Image (cartoon, grey):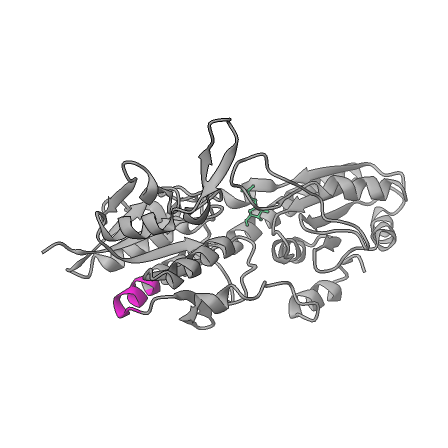
């Protein structure tokens, strides 16, 4: 009698903790004699490749991977079954809907009973659409940005905050030595969680987040005060999605086929140019970028990821499809994927974190 199969896939940007989820899924499933796990390489693309790139995952395959960043299954944030990029004879690209074919292949020849899709907002949106087309799917949320509202926190976020905080700590000593302004640009998309958390943890003087469009005069005032006539120093943390009052986000369009996201980045340099119109200042900009997503996940993120992986398997065994695992302190619960993708998780202006930042004198640009 062939075993029943769970297929696992990682989609969207990578995030520390993905491997810990995969390991937990494989180890929990291995306790069920009738079940086994396979992994699709590069999100759902592996299912649609010829021949399919779908690999069997045993306890041996996942041994020790929980301490490694990235994903052993690889990932992508381009295309997907609903919009599969196909090169045209004239060299241009068009997209094709290959969902039906993918759903058929999952049944035969792959013999998959349940799919666990680990991903961010985009992947959960795809998972919901596939569920509506009849797929037995469970979602596992991941993102360093912490911008999903249906879970208290996502794994990967704490690791990113640690890395950003470590950077603030390091920038302090060089900034103080040179009486400089140092601007640290961090990730987070449209939410300021990483930036504000690192600013509070590292003791930055200014934190600019997307939720509070900044008044450049207020920022210049705060920087000036800290510089004490060029005998002091100042650390500004700016989230990539931040913008000036009445201004636009700094972003560009990707030149990669199938990549839909707005590519944020560069606000640190824009901020410095704006500040220079108000003061003559010795300053440098540091863009932390993908360093925030690399390396070893923190213990907290490994634990959360492991809990998510185990819960996802349990939901699959119970047949609770169309749900996403979620952390609602102190429990790991399930929520309908449909609800999970409904609302973006912005930093709330009356949150305790914002209050604490203001309470220790961090200028938020307003
Ligand atoms: O969503 C995670 C994230 O790292 C964002 O913080 C950032 O804007 C984006 O992904 C970068 O995406 P990419 O890896 O495609 O450049």
| Magenta segment, prevailing SS (helix, strand or loop) | helix
Residues 21 and 303: in front is 21
Residues 289 and 47: in front is 47
Q: Residue at x 36, y 50 (%)?
A: 9
141 is higher (above) or lower (below) than 269: below
Q: Residue at x 70, y 60 (%)?
A: 211
17 is higher (above) or lower (below) than 90: below
Q: Position of residue 60 (x, y in %)?
A: 23, 45
337 is higher (above) or lower (below) than 288: below
Q: Residue at x 49, y 66 (%)?
A: 340
Residues shaded magenta: 311-319
Quadrant, the N terminus: bottom left
Residue extending furthest toward the left: 1
Task: Say left or right for 80 vs 233.
Answer: left
Residues 360 and 231: in front is 360
316 is higher (above) or lower (below) than 3: below
Q: Position of residue 353 (x, y in %)?
A: 65, 66
């Amino acid at each position: 009698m062939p075993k029943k199969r769970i297929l696992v896939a990682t989609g969207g940007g990578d995030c520390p903790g993905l491997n810990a989820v995969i390991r937990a899924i494989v180890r929990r499933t291995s306790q069920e004699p009738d079940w086994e796990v396979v992994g699709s390489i590069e999100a759902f693309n592996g299912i649609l490749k010829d021949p399919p790139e779908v690999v069997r995952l045993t306890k041996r395959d996942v041994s020790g991977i929980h301490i490694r960043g990235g994903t052993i299954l690889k990932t992508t944030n381009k295309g997907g079954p609903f919009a599969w990029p196909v090169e045209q004879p004239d060299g241009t690209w068009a997209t094709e809907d290959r969902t039906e074919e993918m759903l058929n292949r999952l049944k035969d020849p792959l013999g998959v009973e349940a799919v666990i899709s680990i991903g961010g907002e985009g992947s959960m949106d795809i998972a919901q659409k596939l569920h509506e087309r009849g797929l037995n799917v469970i979602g596992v949320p991941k993102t360093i940005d912490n911008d999903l509202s249906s879970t208290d926190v996502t794994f990967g976020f704490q690791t990113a905050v640690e890395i950003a905080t470590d950077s603030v700590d390091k920038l302090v000593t060089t900034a103080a030595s040179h009486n400089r302004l140092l601007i640290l640009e961090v990730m987070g998309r449209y939410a300021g969680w990483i930036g504000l958390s690192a600013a509070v943890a590292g003791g930055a003087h200014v934190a600019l987040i997307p939720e509070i469009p900044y008044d450049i005069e207020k920022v210049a005032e705060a920087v000036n005060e800290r510089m004490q006539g060029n005998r002091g120093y100042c650390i500004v943390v700016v989230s990539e999605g931040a913008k000036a009052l009445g201004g636009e986000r700094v972003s560009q369009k990707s030149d990669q086929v199938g990549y839909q996201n707005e590519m944020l980045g560069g606000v640190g340099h824009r901020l410095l140019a704006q500040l220079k119109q108000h003061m003559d200042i010795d300053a440098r900009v540091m863009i932390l970028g993908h360093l925030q997503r690399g390396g070893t996940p923190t213990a907290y993120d490994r634990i959360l990821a492991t809990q998510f992986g185990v819960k996802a398997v349990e939901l699959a065994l119970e047949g609770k499809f169309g749900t996403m695992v979620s952390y609602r302190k102190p429990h790991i619960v399930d929520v309908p994927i449909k609800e999970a993708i409904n609302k973006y998780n912005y930093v709330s202006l009356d949150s305790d974190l914002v209050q604490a930042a203001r309470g220790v004198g961090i200028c938020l640009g307003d």
